[in-house]
Amino acid sequence: MLRRLSILLACTLFLGLAAEGVLSLLLQRSFGELWKERDDSLEELIAERLSLEAALTERAAKTPGPYRVHEDPYVGYAFKQDAEIEYAEKRIRTDALGLRVRPGPPPGPDPFRILFLGDSVAFGHGLDDGEVIAAQVESLLREVRAADAREVVSSTVAVPSWNYRNIVRFLLDHIDLLDPDVVLYMDIDNDLDDSYAADEIGQRRLMEDPGSPDPLLNFRTNRAFFNHAVFRLREEGRALDPDSFGPLSHQAGLSFSSTWRLDDMARALEDLALRLAARGARFALLPYVQHPTHRQVRARLVRLGAEVPSIPLLEEIRDEDTLGTDPHPNAVAERAFAIWTAATLLERGWVPGQAIRELPQVASSFAGRRTRELSDEEVAEWSERFEAEARAKLERTVSGDSLQGMLQIYGGLNVDGSFGPRLAAVLPSGRALRVTLGPFGERPDLYPLEIEVEVDRKEVGTLAIPGADAGPITQEYALPPECGDRPYEVVLKSERWCVYKVLVVAARFVSFESIE
């Protein structure tokens, strides 16, 4: 054995020397010189890329919108870098990463860094720089600790409408620069929605989410259609029955699309917690209200055995706690959040130094309103109950005309009732599915059109629309036996679609029916 190994090593050495000799003879270069050239080329490529980034940043600053395309497709978009932007009727300054500039003094040589992650709530939609939670927590901790305590610097790492994946990826992309000691994620209800992107003029646009199992299915609550349809029905004098709208099922975990996102968010947060712990940083969730997405994800973190603590604030937000024009928290609410957060960080020993003065009291409108976080057992029970209640509320008919069951659609529906590459909904158990669709008459070139009908990710048949002048087409499909007595997901797939004005369209949705 030793003899064979010696022969192998000798042959390898001989071949290496021979290759070095041939290379020197033919190219007048050695391996060492080539490796050095490779290193030099890498440095040149990085320098060239940085120069290009600087040029792109300068050009992006000249577009009218506040956003830019981020280099990481899983982040999608961010604010312009080193810029003054208009957002929510406020003038906002951003730093080199495109984050909201903290209003405090420049940090000293060794600050203790707290990061507030999230979307518009963490960002401070409609608030001035000094009113956002990050700025207020920093100010409070500076006030109540000794003058010689380690300096606290609190920053906002948030962009409006970011989802959980955008948020986590942005932090991990830039973690060496941000270098956090504590990270607090203000998770909110629509964190499960698919990502947005930025267009050529710096405005936000819908995108194909590269992190989704089906990027062409735009997963989000169909608020635009629903609001428009409610307004239409009221204009027509027709009665509305909110109890017939069905559950807001994208959070309920009753289908593949919903379950996948809840599970993926939990796994992403578990991974983030572990990676932060490896750097010596602490991580916690900071929900401003106890919304269903938070509790559903927490229940999954419990099942994973993940150590992700939570800092609770409100059970629910009242109208007087908001900006009035929209549901975002106002400055008084943000002050209460900051006081409660600072108190928790001090109580848990997550910031260096003891408090030598008491924190101020919250406004009287928030006295006694701080909620508690459910225990692991309670949140698991809550999740089971929430999903059971959503299952019981499912409507058998989903109608675009009457809005019956319309909250059960969670992907692909346009404001005019048309849909493009995909349309997805959840329906209660049954023996068959009935689908009714109509043509999008404004684009006759799309027809004849064949649409694939999929149940729980398995094709059950197709529906053909012969022409743009055809009436509504109805077809029935047997459900796969494995659907059993549980809710199922129906997805319509069209490979022929077009952009009509600003809408991506293939056909018009009329109704789904789950037949007993």
Image (cartoon, rainbow, N blue to C red):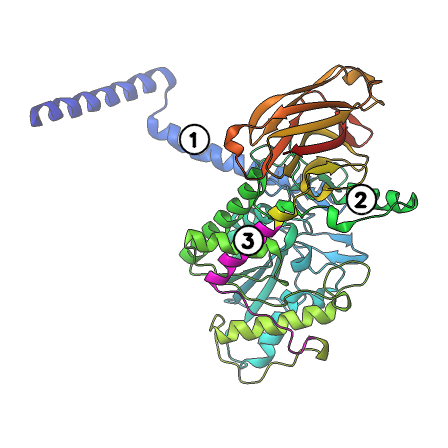
**Residue linked to disc 3:** 296
Residue 205, horizontal then vertical, whole percent: 73, 39
Disc 2/disc 3 C-alpha distance (Å): 39 Å
Is residue 372 found inside the magenta-colored segment of the image?
Answer: yes
Residue type at mark 1: give it. Glu
Residue 70, horizontal then vertical, whole percent: 63, 42
Residue at 81%, 46% in the rendered image: 227
**Residue linked to disc 1:** 37
Q: Is residue 409 left or right of residue 483?
A: right
Disc 2/disc 1 C-alpha distance (Å): 43 Å
Query: Residue farthest to the front?
Result: 516
Residue 202, horizontal then vertical, whole percent: 75, 42
Residue 159, horizontal then vertical, whole percent: 67, 52
Which of discs 2 and 3 lies nearer the camera? The answer is: 3
Numbered range of the magenta stretch: 366-389
- Label whose residue precedes the other's in the sequence (1 or 3): 1
Residue type at mark 3: give it. Gln
**Residue linked to disc 2:** 64
Is residue 434 found inside the magenta-colored segment of the image?
Answer: no
